[in-house]
Image (cartoon, rainbow, N blue to C red):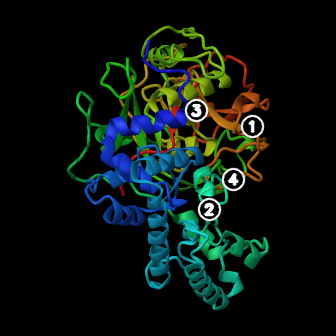
């Protein structure tokens, strides 16, 4: 049994796991990083230089990309409110409450200096980095500084055409209770609300830029610097090589090449993070933009795949394979979060085979237990994340090209999709990774073998679908997933499906509490190490 206290809340565990993995120096930097509402790498480097200069420079990456922060845009990160609150309490305990006032002075100077750099693409200027308007909390007695910033912003707004103005992006959610108690408040929040009076400020050009924005993951040589305590493993982002295959409509191979991607290993053992024979490989998926759904001319498409629409996805990590039965058994014996789990639900037995006959609620419980155990935020993927990761830059019906074959995937190959010959119908699941090929992102078994639950509520088409890669729910009750009653989405097809139901765009609905014979899942981690 893993050494986990069921009474320890996720925030406390997240901070404790961070300290164990990266050391106290990195934790000191994290304390200071909790003061701004949003973070950039530049801001965090400046915080290090001004307050904790003895902390190694590479701790900046550890803070931004460890799970304490969530990506909120290009080089923009946010902390969940309870995490920020816990870190700020640690800041006061370690450095005293005077440090809050010192941070307020620093942030005043930092933002003021950025306002004067209108040619700098990191300046706080409307039309460039609007989210930076919520960079900091300022003490209420800094009236002179606040008025100076107000005047600069008013000048910028007055000189800007209404069509080019963008929305005021004050982050009003998840404010730390500790700072409220100490008399701190969000930068210019009241003024911003009065200035725009709730008027939506949109810019078509800005939307186009946002739609084209992504973080490209490139392979390069670099020195890895890590911090580890005694008897703790050093953690780093690793690279791996894999083969991709492209076929034509007849199923003939027209291209095969070697590719490289990055991943981290989530060990599953007696203690989180320690080397173990059992682990989950989480592959780095770069951010980008794609067309979600299928075009009208795609063979064997369905109306629920319409209309194609542009979606911009932020970087994330996705499991290389669907969750296996041995991974399921380990997590099933971890402390319960909301519901019990059957440790052995699958019909086709095998440690390396994907787990099946698990409901959507079971999959959510798995993610909750894994998050509590590791201190990282795991969940099911959104439907948009799943399709983006499946396509891996392709626009064809399959990530492999115009069709698939039974040499590339496990499905009902008694049926054909295009002009390819019939193949082997295995009539059962296969061990993950059996086919020795992956898509361009390094993901295996993305077509066939097992259908994969997604987080979203089911919708009959994409009318009104989000364009930011987030999960699409019919209501705002997202804090308690176990209360959701609507049908959910499954993607990818399975061992029993014909090839048309294994296409990248194919989607099907399922009742959340059903245990389908071909229903499984793979997991996503929204916060991770992204190199650009």
Q: Secondary structure at mark 1?
A: loop
Q: Quadrant of residue 207?
A: bottom right
Q: Residues within 10 Å of mark 3 (few under 14, many from 20)?
A: many
Task: Answer with mark 4 or mark 3, whichever residue precedes in sequence.
Answer: 4
Q: Residue 401 placed where, x, y %?
A: 48, 43
User: Is residue 276 placed above or below 531 in the rendered structure?
Assistant: above
Q: Nearer the viewer, mark 2 or mark 3?
A: 2
Q: Is residue 266 left or right of residue 12?
A: left
Quickly name the residue at label 3: 492
Q: Nearer the viewer, residue 471 or 91?
A: 91
Q: Residues within 10 Å of mark 2 (few under 14, many from 20)?
A: few
Q: Residues within 10 Å of mark 4 (few under 14, many from 20)?
A: some
How much space separates mark 2 and mark 3, taking CA atoms? 51 Å
Quickly name the residue at label 1: 458
Residue 183's mark? 2
How much space separates mark 1 and mark 3, taking CA atoms? 15 Å
């Amino acid at each position: 049994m893993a050494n986990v206290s069921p009474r320890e809340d996720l925030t406390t565990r997240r901070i404790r796991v961070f300290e164990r993995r990266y050391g106290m120096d990195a934790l000191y930097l994290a304390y200071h990083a909790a003061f701004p509402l949003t973070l950039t790498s530049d801001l965090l480097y400046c915080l290090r230089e001004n307050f904790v200069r003895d902390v190694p420079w590479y701790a900046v990456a550890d803070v931004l990309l460890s799970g304490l922060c969530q990506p909120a845009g290009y080089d923009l990160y946010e902390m969940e409110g309870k995490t920020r609150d816990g870190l700020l309490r640690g800041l006061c305990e370690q450095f005293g409450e005077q440090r809050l006032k010192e941070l307020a002075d620093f942030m005043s100077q930092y933002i003021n200096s950025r306002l004067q750099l209108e040619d700098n693409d990191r300046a706080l200027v409307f039309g460039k980095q609007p989210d930076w308007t919520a960079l900091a909390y300022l003490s209420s007695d800094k009236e002179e500084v606040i008025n100076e910033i107000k005047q600069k912003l008013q000048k910028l707004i007055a000189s800007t055409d209404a069509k080019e103005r963008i929305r005021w992006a004050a982050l009003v959610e998840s404010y730390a209770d500790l700072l409220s108690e100490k008399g701190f408040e969000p930068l210019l929040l009241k003024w911003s609300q009065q200035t725009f009076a709730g008027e939506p400020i949109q810019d078509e050009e800005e939307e186009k830029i946002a739609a084209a924005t992504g973080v490209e993951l490139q392979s390069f040589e670099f020195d890895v610097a890590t911090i580890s305590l005694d008897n703790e493993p050093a953690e780093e982002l690793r690279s791996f090589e894999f083969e991709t295959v492209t076929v034509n409509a007849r199923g003939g191979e027209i291209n095969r090449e070697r590719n490289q991607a990055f991943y981290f290993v989530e060990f599953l053992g007696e203690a989180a993070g320690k080397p173990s024979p059992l682990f989950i490989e989480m592959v780095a998926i770069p951010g980008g933009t794609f067309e979600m759904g299928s075009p009208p001319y795609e063979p064997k498409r369905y109306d629920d795949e319409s209309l194609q629409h542009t979606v911009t996805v932020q970087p994330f990590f996705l499991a290389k394979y669907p969750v296996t039965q041995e991974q399921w058994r380990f997590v099933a014996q971890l402390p319960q979060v909301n519901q019990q789990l059957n440790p052995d639900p699958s019909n086709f037995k095998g440690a390396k085979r994907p787990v099946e006959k698990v409901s959507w609620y079971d999959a959510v419980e798995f993610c909750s237990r894994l998050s509590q155990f590791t201190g990282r935020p795991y969940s099911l993927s959104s439907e948009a994340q799943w399709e983006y990761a499946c396509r891996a830059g392709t626009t064809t019906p399959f990530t492999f090209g115009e069709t698939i074959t039974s040499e590339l995937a496990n499905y009902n190959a008694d049926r054909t999709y295009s002009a390819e010959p019939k193949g082997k119908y295995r009539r059962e699941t296969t061990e993950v990774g059996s086919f020795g090929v992956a898509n361009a992102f390094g993901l295996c078994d993305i077509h066939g073998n097992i259908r994969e639950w997604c987080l979203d509520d089911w919708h009959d088409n994409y009318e009104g679908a989000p364009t930011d890669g987030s999960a699409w729910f019919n209501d705002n009750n997202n804090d308690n997933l176990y209360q959701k009653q609507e049908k959910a989405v499954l993607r990818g097809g399975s061992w029993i499906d014909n090839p048309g139901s294994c296409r990248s765009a194919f989607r099907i609905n399922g009742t959340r509490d059903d245990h389908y014979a071909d229903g499984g899942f793979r997991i996503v981690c929204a916060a991770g190490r992204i190199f650009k």
